[in-house]
Every structure is written in structure tokens, then in C-alpha cells.
Amino acid sequence: MISPIIIIGTPRSGTSIVAKWLMDNYGVRLTLNGYRTVDVGNTYEDEYVVACNENLNEKKISMRYYKYLMKQWFRQMSKFKVPWGFKDPQLFTGLLWVIDHFNGNLTIIRTKRRAELVVRSMVEKIAYTTEQAVQVINGYEKHFQKVLKGIPVIEVYFDGTRKTENDFVESFNKSLAIRMAA
């Protein structure tokens, strides 16, 4: 089985840029509906995965049922015999299980962006208050630090207000080189 690629980060941190780049340059499949399908508002997220993660986070489904649903999706994706994965900033409660499920045999790409830029983007694009945005960012950061401790992660930084594909490629390649050297 081809090991999956998981793209994580706080909302508005660059996960969609990373997803698009991986799809366009490596043919990574991120949705069941096809290579170029963008299911959820041009975010390169699979509707099924988003629904599973949202329902788990909101305690509408149990962890047991979440595992069952995600295993079904993983089986379907692995049938394509191409690089595959998923991107969902909602992957929060289930992240540790996903890592354990693949015995660490996956690639985790974590996007990071300066907090003030994420806050501004959340206020402008999602209509959060500044306080809500800060609370979300702090929650994600605390969770990622706990869950990802000791796990190899490729970190991609977006420090400006807008990154070009070349900026991403440079950051990604540098992160990959550091990871390979470790």
C-alpha cells in the first residue's frame, strides 16, 4: 500500500496551497471523486473526510464509528495505486488515531503561518472575531505540539501575506532536505 500524505495546519495557514501543489506536481489524489475535483469551496478537501472529522469533533459520532468510516475511505483511496492522502484542517480529534492506524508510515505536512496573518485571514474570510481566531489558533497549536511530539513532520512556512508557488516549492524542498538528513 502506498503510504498516505496528510496535510494539516490551522485554518487559513496555507494547507490549500500545499494540496494544490501536490496535486498539480505529483498527481497526489486527495478526493475520491477525481484528481482535479475540489469538493469543498476550492479547498481541496474530500467532503466525506470533512464530514467525518466535523462529526467526530462535534461528538456527533463515536471514535469507534469514526475509525470504521475512515478505514472505508482509506481502502477506497488505496485502490487507485497512486500517491494519495487528504487535507482537512478539521483533522483534530482523530489525528492521533490516523497516525497510529498507519503505524507512522505516512507523510505529514504541516503548514505554518504567522499568527497575526492567520488571525487577520480568519476575521476577513471566516467572519471570526479576533478573540475567536486567537482561541482557535491556540487550540490547534497546543494540540499539534502534544500529538506530533517526536513524529517526523515536514513543516512548510508561509511568512508573508501571499506566497507564490515558487516560495512554497523552496520552503517545501528545504523542509524535505532537512527531514531526509535527519
Image: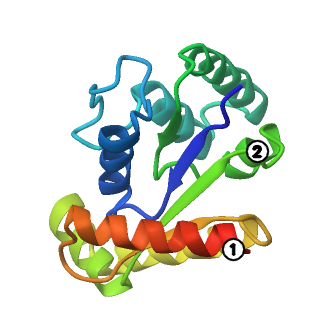
Q: Secondary structure at mark 2?
A: loop
Checking the image for residue 181, the label placed there is: 1
Density class for disc 1 (Cα within 10 Å; few <14, some 14-19, many ≥20) is: few
Q: Where 79 falls versus 97 (above or below)?
A: above
Residue 62 visible from this viewpoint: yes
Question: What residue is shown at x 72% (from left), y 32% (from top)?
Answer: 62
Could you tell me which quadrant the C terminus lies in? bottom right
Q: Residue 13, can we see it?
A: no
At label 1, which amino acid type do we have?
Ala
Q: Residue at x 60, y 13 (%)?
A: 79
Question: Residue 122: x, y in percent?
Answer: 27, 68
Q: Nearer the viewer, residue 173 or 158?
A: 173
Q: Is residue 135 above or below residue 23?
A: below
Which residue sits at x=68%, y=30%? Answer: 66
Distance of label 2 from label 1 (alpha carbons): 18 Å
Q: How many marks?
A: 2
| Picture quadrant where residue 169 is located | bottom left
Residue 176: name its quadrant: bottom right
Above or below, 80 against 116 in this view is above
Q: Is there a contact, CB below 8 Å, between mark 2 and mark 1?
A: no
Give how far across and how far down residue 147 sits, in percent.
73, 64
N-terminal-most mark, 2 or 1 = 2
Would residue 179 appear left or right of 18 to someone viewing this image?
A: right
Q: Secondary structure at mark 1?
A: helix
Circle nearer the viewer, 2 or 1: 1
Residue 105: mark:
2
60 versus 103 height, above or below: above
Q: Quadrant of the N terminus?
A: top right
Instruction: Specify the amino acid type for callout 2.
Output: Asn
